[in-house]
Image: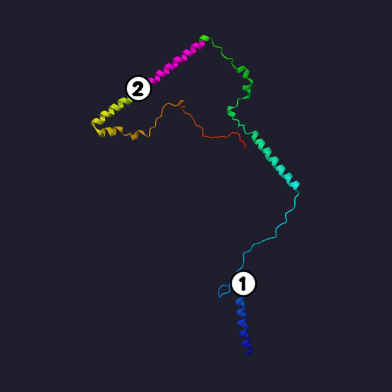
């Protein structure tokens, strides 16, 4: 009997002590026993910074600044230089033959200069006369078209509306005419191979 009573009192004390401990540590929130743990931070002690001589730091900054200034000067020097185009460059053998190929300037007499000036004036008069004739012809055509439409409107408004409506069959208009060069008979066209021989330039 003594052992049973002692065990009951011990169990009551242990349960009360456990409940007090659990309530203070906030491990258990209900009757069931639940455990909670905090996040793992994996912290480590901070490394001590090595003390560097200020003169060494200043020398590094000076070298970095000089390197940047050198690059800036190089870019400013090459800023106005354009990429050369091989198709527009004059071959060297033609530059060597420039003295042979260069023609002396033509010396015109006063009569030749006056004849050329008169010819230019005659050509300007002819082109102006042609332009005015074209403008007058366009005006005549437009006025005749307007008179015809007005008379058609007086006769029948439905016919006028049909005449004014655009012809939708003429919109997808395609035409084939003479080309710059005539076609070559029995011409075997190449397969379209393309070899890029252009030079690569670095920016």
Q: Nearer the viewer, residue 109 or 97?
A: 109
Q: Position of residue 60 (x, y in %)?
A: 72, 45
Comes first in the chain, label 1 or label 2: 1
- The reply to whether callout 1 and callout 2 are in contact (CB within 8 Å) is no
What is the image's colouring? rainbow
Give the left or right position of residue 116, taking residue 85 as reference: left
Residue assigned mark 1: 25
The picture quadrant where one finds residue 65 is top right
Q: Residue at x 42, y 16 (%)?
A: 125
> What whole-number distance in Å separates the C-alpha atoms at marks 1 and 2?
108 Å
Other residues around mark 1 within 10 Å, as few (<14) / some (14–19) / many (≥20) = few
> Magenta part of the protein: which range?
112-139
Give the percent coordinates (x, y) of residue 90: 60, 25
Residue for badge 2: 137
In this rendering, would 166 be left or right of 126? left
Residue 154 in percent (x, y) is at: 24, 30
Q: For the point 60% across and 82% down, which residue is it?
A: 12
Mark 2 falls on what kind of element?
Answer: helix
In this picture, is 96 found above or below 187?
A: above
Q: Horizontal placement of 63 versus 79: left or right?
A: right
Instruction: Report the predominant secondary structure element of the magenta stretch.
Output: helix
Left or right for 174, reference 56: left
Q: Nearer the viewer, residue 202 or 57?
A: 57
């Amino acid at each position: 009997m003594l052992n049973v009573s002692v065990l009951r009192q011990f169990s009551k004390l242990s349960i009360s002590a456990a409940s007090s401990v659990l309530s203070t540590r906030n491990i258990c929130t209900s009757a069931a026993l639940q455990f909670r743990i905090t996040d793992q931070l994996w912290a480590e002690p901070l490394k001590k910074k090595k003390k560097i001589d200020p003169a060494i730091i200043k020398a590094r900054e000076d070298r970095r600044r000089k390197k940047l200034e050198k690059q800036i000067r190089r870019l400013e020097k090459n800023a106005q230089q354009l990429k050369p185009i091989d198709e527009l460059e004059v071959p060297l053998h033609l530059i060597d033959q420039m003295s042979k190929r260069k023609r002396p300037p033509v010396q015109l007499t006063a009569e030749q200069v006056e004849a050329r000036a008169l010819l230019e004036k005659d050509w300007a008069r002819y082109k102006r006369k042609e332009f005015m004739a074209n403008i007058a012809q366009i005006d005549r055509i437009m006025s005749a078209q307007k008179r015809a439409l007005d008379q058609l409107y007086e006769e029948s408004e439905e016919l006028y509306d049909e005449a004014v409506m655009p012809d939708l069959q003429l919109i997808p208009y395609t035409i084939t005419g003479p080309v710059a060069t005539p076609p070559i008979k029995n011409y075997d066209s190449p397969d379209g191979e393309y070899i890029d021989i252009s030079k690569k330039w670095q920016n």
